[in-house]
Amino acid sequence: MAAIEISNVSKSYALNRKSSVTALQGIDLSVAQGQFVALIGPSGCGKSTLLHLVAALEAVSAGSILIDGEPPAALRDQHRLGIAFQDHALLPWLSVESNLALPYKIAGVAVDKARIKHLIELVGLVGFEHARPSQLSGGMRQRAAIARSLCLDPALLLLDEPFGALDAVTRMRMNIELQRIWLERRPTTLLVTHSVEEAIFLADRVIVLGGRPGTIVESIDVPFPRPRPVELMRSEEFHRLTDYLTVLLEPSLR
Amino acid sequence: MGLAVRLVMRLFEQAWGLIAIFAFWQIWVMANHYNSIVIVSPLAVLRDMALNPMIYLLPSLWTLAFSLGGLAAGMSIGLLLAITAWRWRLFAGTIGPTALLISSTPVVCLIPLLARIFGYESRTEFVTVAVMSFFPCFVFATAGLRALPPMSRELFHVLAASRSRQLLSLALPAAIPSLSIALRVGAATSVLVTMVAEYLMQTGGLGNMFALTSQAFQTERAWGASLAAMMLSAILYTIGGAVELKVRERFR
Amino acid sequence: MTGPREKTSVGQISLIVAVQLALLAAWELLARSGALGISVPALSRVLQVYAQPRFAALLYRSAMATGKSALTGLLIGIVIGIVTAMVAHLLRPLRPGLDRLAVTINAIPAVALGPIFILMVSRELTPSLLATIPVSFLIYIAVSSGLRTASTGLGRMMTTFGAGKVKRLFYLEIPSALPSFLGGVKVSMTAAMIGAIVGEWFGAPTGLGIVILNTMQNFEIPLMWAAVLLVAGLALTGYGIAHLLERLVTRRFA
C-alpha cells in the first residue's frame, strides 16, 4: 500500500506565448496508506487534473508529489497503479476476459487466470467473460473497467468519476458494490466525483476543492464505520454532512 | 408462390439498372444493324463466354493473381510506412510530400514510365498495382493508427506500456477498420489497373486477351474479356465490402 | 492526415524541406552516374525539356487539351453524380438498383469503353466521357453518403416544425452533405485525369496521354518524364484547389 504526499503543488497551462491559466494552486495533501480519499468540487476546479498529476499523466508546474517517497512515474513504471475513467476505456475488439488480461500483458508478467476469474466474480460479471464491451450495458462496462483497474493488485487506485455517466439508480448500486470490492484489499484510493453522496458513502476523507484556480477549501473525515449499509444514506447524520458539503460547493444555497 | 414473387421483386429492386442497360444495348444493336466487327449484342458476348469458359478462365486467373499480389505488396508497404510515421512523427512530414506526388500522379501515366524502367514484363503489372495501392493504404492506416478508443491512450500510459506494446495491443487493432476500407477500395481498382497495364504491355491476362482479340476483330471475345474483368472487379468489391462490414461489427 | 493537430516548428519544417531537397539531389546524382539505367534521366535533363521552345509549345498544347477534357468530364460527372444521388435519396425504392448500377458502370474497364465511345460519339469527346464515368461514381457515392449523415435529431426537429421532404433536403440534408461532396471532388481530380488520358490513348488528336505514349515508343525518355511530371502537377493543382475549398467549407459547416 502506498502513501501519498502532495506538497505545495501548482499546475498551469500555457494558453499562448504570453498568458497562461492556473488550474491548481498551492495544494497540500497527505493520504495515509490504505485510506480512501474522495475529491469533490465544482466542474473546472481541477480535481481531475490533480488525479492526472498523481497518475503521472501530466507533470506538476511547481511543488512535488511523492508516493512512498518516490515520484509518481516510479510507481507507474513498476506497474503498481490502477486506474478507471468516466469513459470505460475497454478495448472494443477484446472480450471482457481479454480486457482484464491486458494489464498483465502490458506489465510483461504471466496472466493470472485465477485472479481474473475471481475479479469477474467479485464485480458480478460471471457469464459475460466472453462478451465484448459493445454487448454490455453501461453499468456492466464500468464494472469491467473497475475489475481491470484491480488486476495487478495496485498499491494505489485512481478513480476518475467512474460512475459519472450512469443513471442515478445504477450509480447507487455501483457505489455499494465498489465498497464491497474495495474492502477486500483496501488499496489506497483517490476518487474524483461531483456527487457529494457518493463521496461521503465511499470515502474515509472528503477533500473539497474550490474553483479557479483550484485550491483545497475543506477537508473532513467521514466518521461512519465500515462496512456501511445502504440505510446509512437515509440517516440524519449522513444528510447533515451532505448539506454541509453541498453548501460549501455552492454557497448561494445557504 | 408468394415467396417466389418476393424473390423476383428483390432481384428486380437490386438489378433494374443493369437490366435496363442490357436491354438498351441489345435493342440499340438490333435497331442499327451493326456489323458484328464493330459492335456486338450482349447476348452474343454471353453466348461466347458460356460456350468457351476455359478460354476465359486462365487469363482471368492471371489477372486476378497479379492484382491481388500487387495489392498485397502495396498495402504492406503502405502499412509499414504508416507504422514508421506513427513511431517517428518527423518521418511522417518527410515522406508526406513525396507520397502525395506519387499518389496524385494518375497511375495509368506511370505505366509507360514503369514499363521503361522494369521492362515489358509481368513484374511491371505487379509494380503498377503496388504503386497504385500503397498510398491509399498509407493514408487510411495513418488515420486508423490514431483513431484510438477514448481514454485508451491514457490507460496505456498509466499502465506504463512500452511503445511496441502500444503498437501491438492498441494502435494496430484500432487501425484494422480503416485498413479494411483501404482493402475494399483497392481490391476493385486493382483489377482494372492490372487490365490497363496488360493492355499496354501485352504481357498476358485479360488485358492482353482484349488487345489481341480486338485486333483480330473477334469483338465478342474482346468484350467478353472486359465483362470478365468487370465481374472480377465487382466480386472483389463485394467481398471487400463484406469483410469491411464484419470487421466493423467486430471492432466497434 | 487526421489525428490531433500538433504544431510543426520552424526547425521541423526546414528539416522536411532539407530531406526533400536531398531526395531530389540524390535522384540527380544517381541518374548522372548511370546507376538508375537509361530509363531514368537526371532531373536537370527533364527540366531542360521545359526550357526548349519546341517541346514547351508541344507540352503546353497537349496540357491544354488534356486539361480541357478532364475539366469537362469533371463538370459533367459532378452534375450526373449529384442528380443521381438526389434521385436515389428522394425515391428510396430506386436506391439499391442505382447503387448496383453505379458500382457496375464504374467497374467497366476503361480500355473496353474507349472503343464504344469512339463509335458512339467521336474521338475528340472520348477522353471527356471516360473522365465523366469515374467522377460521377465518386460524386454519387460521396453525396449519397453525405445526405445520409444529416443528424436524425435535427431531422426530427424539422419534422416537428412541419417541414416537408423537400424543405428538409434544402435546409438540412444538402448543407450536411457539403463536406462529404467536396471530399468526393478532391478524389475526383485524379480520377478525371486518368479518364482523360486513357481516353486519349484511343486516338485523340492531341493531349498529354498521346505525348506519353509516343515518347515511350520512340525512346524520348526526358520528354516522357517531363510529360508525366506535368500530369502529376496538374492533378496535384486540382487536388490542392479542392482541398482549399473543402477546408473553407468544413470550417463553416462543421
Image (tube, coloured by chain):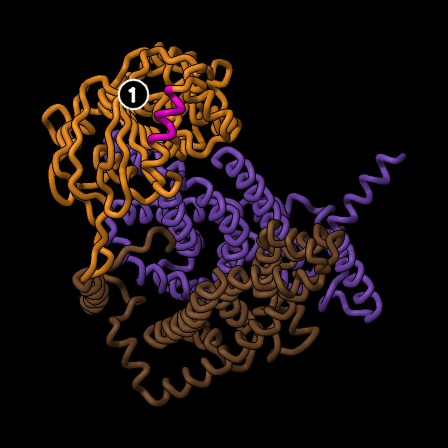
Chain colours: A orange, B purple, C brown
**Residue occupying the point 18% across, 62% down:** A18
Measured as percent of width and height from the top left, residue C190 is found at 47, 66
Residue B231 seen: yes
Q: Nearer the viewer, residue C19 or A71?
A: A71
Name the residue tied to disc 1. A222
Read off the magenta span.
Answer: A237-244
Q: Quadrant of residue A108?
A: top left
Residue lying furthest right: B1
Q: Nearer the viewer, residue C225 or A186?
A: A186
The kind of secondary structure the magenta stretch mainly shows is: helix
Residue lying furthest bottom: C53
Give above or below for A143 relative to C166. Answer: above
Q: Amino acid at mark 1?
A: Val
Q: Quadrant of residue A58?
A: top left
Residue A147 seen: no
Measured as percent of width and height from the top left, residue B55 is found at 64, 47
**Residue occupying the point 77% across, 69% down:** B35
Give above or below for B108 relative to B175. Answer: below
Give above or below for C175 relative to A130. Answer: below
